[in-house]
Amino acid sequence: MKHIIKIITLLVAISAFWIGLLQASVIPSSHTWLLPIYFIVSLGCYGLLMVGVGLMRFPTCPQEALLLQQDIVEAKDFLKQKGVDVGGSD
């Protein structure tokens, strides 16, 4: 719930800033009307950047990989005991 309140507060602040720019005529109105589009494009670029950084820093877990392989072997043995063909010769 706190996260939603932060998002709503941020959207209200951005909207107030944008309306203030429209009313004050500090920036020409032709540019001011494009600010929401610039904001959305910037937000998309930021999101793609964060996904890329997250993928570059994605941790490898060799211990977890070994545990997963053991679980797979146990599952195959269990299924073979129940008469299910698992399709692997491992």
Image (cartoon, rainbow, N blue to C red):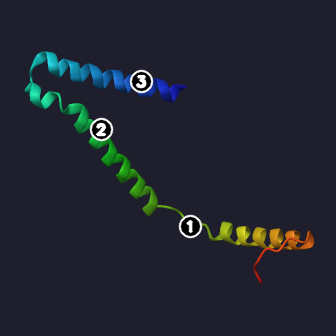
**What's the amino acid at mark 1?**
Thr
Query: Could you say which disc has been placed on residue 60 in the image?
Result: 1
Of the image marks 1 and 2, the number of the one nearer the N terminus: 2
- Residue labelled with disc 3: 8
In screen coordinates, is 7 left or right of 32?
right
**Dot 3, how many residues are within 10 Å of its Cα: few (below 14), some (14-19), or many (20+)?**
few
| 1 to 70, vertically: above or below | above
How far across and down, in percent of the image, does residue 56 sit? Answer: 43, 63
Viewer-side residue, 30 vs 48: 30
Three-letter amino acid code of the residue under disc 3 = Ile
The numbered mark, 3 or 1, whose residue comes first in the sequence reads 3
Mark 2 lies on residue: 40
- Residue most extreme to the bottom: 89
Number of marks? 3
Q: In the image, is 45 to the left or to the right of 52?
A: left
Q: Residue at x 36, y 26 (%)?
A: 10
In what quadrant of the picture does the N terminus appear?
top right
